[in-house]
Image: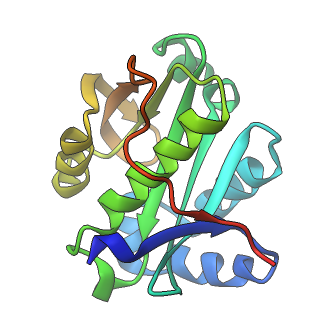
Amino acid sequence: MASTVSLRAIEPSDLDRIEAWLKQPDIQRWRGDPASSSAELRLVMESPSALCRMIEAEGIAIGYGHVADAAISREALRAALPPETWMLDLFVADPANRGLGHGEAAIRALVGELFATTLALAVAVLPPVRNEAAVRAYERIGFRWLRVVVDPILGPSWLMLLDRPSNGLALGPAPFQTSG
């Protein structure tokens, strides 16, 4: 069940697992080349304006997600976004945990943590057009389509945006756990 999903801070011991996940053919289909993905994730992990989290189900790591200030994104992408927007990137690596709502629960938790701990006014995602399951999950959460952009690695991708809730409420509890 999706209710068993939690997020925790990245630990140095997680890096090898994340690198291995990026080499999985099904992950490469949505993220591109493992070397490029790894470089991007390491850049985000080194940014002081990012929240990087392991996704766990029943205490077992099943995926990775982050939100980062869009200021570290490509200039063309930044220009298409409102000020104070952060970018979300997330994947459930374990095939046995896909299709169970874990990804959607993790998105809600990460976005909830973002809005609870930063002054971000919006969060954006860039799922490939061909990844309809991800696009539908983002729609269910409340992301709206802005336009299609051509990502140099993944091809045509939807630029989708979710504004900070005006009522001050997050998207549900953010089950974030600190390590240690």
Compare residues 148 and 82 and report the one nearer the observer: 82
Q: Relative to residue 110, is residue 94 drawn left or right?
A: left
Q: Is residue 1 left or right of residue 52?
A: left
Q: Residue at x 46, y 57 (%)?
A: 90
For the image shown, how many numbered marks are present on the structure? 0
Q: How is the image coloured?
A: rainbow
**Where residue 74 sits in the image (x, y, percent)?**
61, 27
Residue 176 percent location from the top left of the image: 59, 61
Q: Pick the quarter of the image with the C terminus.
A: bottom right
Q: Nearer the viewer, residue 169 or 11?
A: 169
Picture layout, residue 31 above or below residue 165: below
Quarter of image, res 30: bottom left
Q: Is residue 25 left or right of residue 78?
A: left
State the image coordinates of residue 84 (x, y, percent, origin top left): 60, 17
In this picture, is 33 found above or below 131?
below
Residue in view at x 38 percent, y 47 percent: 172
> Relative to residue 65, is residue 101 drawn left or right?
left
The residue at the point 51 percent across, 50 percent down is 110
User: Residue sitting at 35 percent across and 29 percent down?
Assistant: 159
Which quadrant of the rendered structure holds the N terminus? bottom left
